[in-house]
Image (cartoon, rainbow, N blue to C red):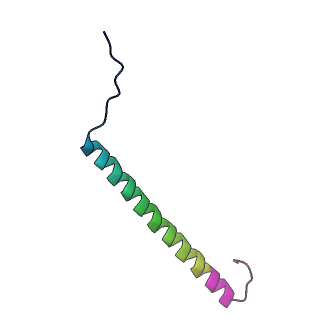
Amino acid sequence: MIHNRIIEPSKSYLYLLGGIRLGLNLYLAQVLLVIGWLSSSIHNKSRKLGCLKVC
């Protein structure tokens, strides 16, 4: 007889998944900061050159 039981994952597995999610979130935040920094740097340089848009 086969029982349809939901197998609960172990706590260590859940902690591992949580750590992976946290690491990915921190990595994504750093990537977005770099993109924002590059964007503002390009915008400031184009403003100094007298361009209204990114040249």
Question: Can you name the residue that lies furthest to the top here?
Answer: 1
Quarter of the image for residue 4 reads top left
What is the magenta segment's predominant secondary structure? helix
Q: Is residue 8 above or below residue 46?
A: above
| Front position in the image: 11 or 33 | 11
Q: Is residue 50 magenta?
A: yes
Q: Is residue 49 magenta?
A: yes
| For residue 23, side relative to residue 50 (left or right) | left
Residue occupying the point 39% across, 53% down: 21
Residue occupying the point 53% across, 76% down: 37
Q: Is residue 7 above or below residue 46?
A: above
What x and y, as percent, mark residue 35?
A: 54, 70
Q: Is residue 5 above or below residue 54?
A: above
| Front position in the image: 35 or 15 | 15
What x and y, as percent, mark residue 49?
A: 68, 89
Over which residues does the magenta segment extend? 43-51
Residue occupying the point 34% across, 47% down: 17
Q: Quadrant of the C terminus?
A: bottom right
What x and y, as percent, mark residue 42?
A: 61, 79
What x and y, as percent, mark residue 1?
A: 30, 9
| Front position in the image: 24 or 5 | 5
Q: Is residue 41 above or below residue 15?
A: below
Quarter of the image for residue 45 reads bottom right
